Image (tube, helix red, strand yellow):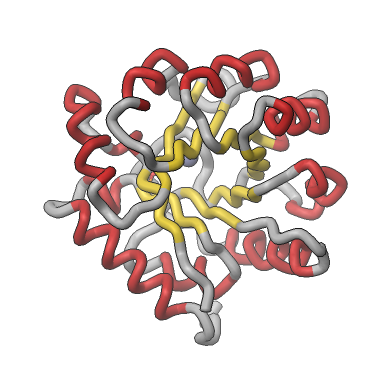
Amino acid sequence: MKKPVISPSILSADFSQLGKVIRTTSETAAEYIHIDVMDGCFVPNLTIGPCVISSIRRYTNKVFDVHLMIEEPIRYIDDYVKAGADIITVHYEACSDLKATLKKIRAAGVRAGLSVKPRTDVSAIRPYLRYTDMILIMTVEPGFGGQSFIYDTIENIKTAKRMTARLKRRIPIEVDGGITPDTIGEAARAGAEIFVAGSAVYKAKNISAAVDDLLFRAGSAYGTKSVH
Ligand code: DX5
Ligand code: ZN
């Protein structure tokens, strides 16, 4: 039986209470914490940098799942590793030398994630899978939390799943954007194992109960048939 992982995205949290939010998240069943880094260039929004990550690092031992939505992330890998990232995900669309970028992440001692936007052909990442430890399928256009899940991206999850099934090494698939109690089952059935959830966790009254509910719904979806 596959075990789902929840990665709450702090983008939807109250930034004025960040330390407290991280501490509370630390007490939930979520194994990862998802940190969205945006540069106002690759995506039309600006968020946080390495100094914020290093200041929240001391509040938890959870896996820091850092999603870089920035142009040419190779320039900042060392900074994010030093700040405390455990996984660094870069975008296929944002790197002029993707192989060098992924190799640099691994050489720095952390896991290398590779992400594609909803309209990118997922098969384009095939040549880079040998340098990749996790695939992140975007299920909304990157840039903002609180958007609706794009159902067409189910096909992208399935394509990634088919591509990785042929490999000897296991590469888990993460999904990000619009993951809620209503959509998580479809993403799980298509092959996702790691689920980023921003508003579904941080806009809930009880974030621990929200994480448990997502875990339960993903877990029960495995092994059942897709309706899409
Ligand atoms: C969007 C970010 C997501 C976002 C998810 O660009 O990568 O991680 O915070 O938020 P929800 O779960 O609210 O769609
Ligand atoms: Zn993200």
Q: Residue at x 19, y 22 (%)?
A: 16
As rendered, which of 44 and 161 lies closer to the eye? 161
- Give the total of numbered labels: 0
**50 with respect to 207 (left or right):** right
Asked which quadrant contains residue 215, the reply is bottom left
As rendered, which of 127 and 62 lies closer to the eye? 62
Residue 228: percent from left, percent from top = 55, 77
Spot the residue most to the bottom. Answer: 224
Rendered position, 86 above or below 169: above
Asked which quadrant contains residue 156, the reply is bottom right
**96 with respect to 204 (left or right):** right
Q: Residue at x 20, y 52 (%)?
A: 207
Spot the residue most to the left. Answer: 205
Asked which quadrant contains residue 163, the reply is bottom right
Residue 149: percent from left, percent from top = 45, 56
**20 with respect to 172 (left or right):** left
Q: Residue at x 69, y 65 (%)?
A: 161
Residue 214: percent from left, percent from top = 33, 64
Q: Residue at x 27, y 67 (%)?
A: 213
Rendered position, 97 above or below 189: above
